[in-house]
């Protein structure tokens, strides 16, 4: 199973290369590398990341994994909000 982590943040002084990297990683899907949605000026963003869940992993490990994925993009940012969803806790109701 996996965790889905959503990080809302604000970029601090993106240069042209950073802006290009963020635009290339655009999308609303949860992936292990993470995807960005952002405002028109690419100043505020939502980063969505899927983090594999080990049997003893909790929200703290998932948050650290997502932060590492965000750090891999190498862009300066401030985190405004972080939310973790443990997909092991999600119940799916099937139609009959």
Image (cartoon, rainbow, N blue to C red):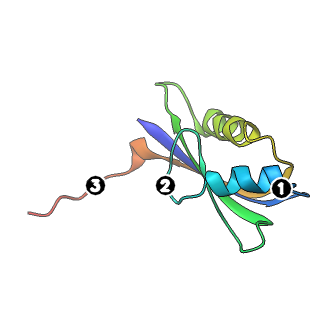
When the figure is inspected, residue 82 is found, relative to residue 66, above or below; the finding is below
When the figure is inspected, residue 75 is found, relative to residue 40, above or below; the finding is above
Q: Which mark is residue 61?
A: none
Between marks 1 and 2 in the image, the one whose residue lies nearer the viewer: 1
Q: Secondary structure at mark 1?
A: helix
Q: Of the two numbered discs 1 and 3 on the same chain, state the one appearing first in sequence.
A: 1
Front-most of residues 93 and 80:
80
Which residue reaches farthest left?
Answer: 96
Q: Which mark is residue 16?
A: 1
Which residue reaches farthest bottom?
Answer: 40
Q: Which mark is residue 92?
A: 3
Which residue reaches farthest top?
Answer: 55
Front-most of residues 29 and 42:
42
Front-most of residues 62 and 69:
69
- Crowdedness of circle 3 by 10 Å Cα count: few (<14), some, many (20+)? few
Between marks 3 and 2 in the image, the one whose residue lies nearer the viewer: 2
- Crowdedness of circle 1 by 10 Å Cα count: few (<14), some, many (20+)? few
Q: Is residue 7 visible?
A: no
The residue sitting at 60% across, 37% down in the picture is 62
Q: Is residue 9 left or right of residue 12?
A: left
Q: Secondary structure at mark 3?
A: loop
Name which quarter of the figure residue 88 lies in.
Answer: top left
Measured in 3D between alpha carbons, the distance from the residue under mark 1 to the one under mark 3, in whole angstroms, is 43 Å
Q: Of the two numbered discs 1 and 2 on the same chain, state the one appearing first in sequence.
A: 1
Q: Of the two numbered discs 3 and 2 on the same chain, state the one appearing first in sequence.
A: 2
Q: Are marks 1 and 2 in contact (CB under 8 Å)?
A: no
Measured from the top left, where is residue 52 in percent x and y? 50, 32
From the image, tell me which residue sits under label 2. 29
**Looking at the figure, which quarter contains the C terminus?**
bottom left
């Amino acid at each position: 199973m996996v965790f889905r982590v959503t990080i809302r943040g604000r970029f601090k002084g993106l240069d042209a290369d950073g802006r290009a990297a963020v635009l290339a990683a655009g999308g609303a899907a949860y992936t292990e590398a993470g995807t960005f949605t952002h405002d028109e000026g690419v100043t505020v963003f939502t980063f969505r990341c899927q983090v594999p869940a080990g049997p003893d992993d909790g929200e703290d490990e998932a948050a650290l994994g997502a932060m590492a994925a965000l750090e891999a993009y190498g862009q300066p940012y401030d985190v405004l909000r972080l939310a973790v969803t443990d997909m092991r806790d999600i119940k799916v109701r099937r139609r009959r």
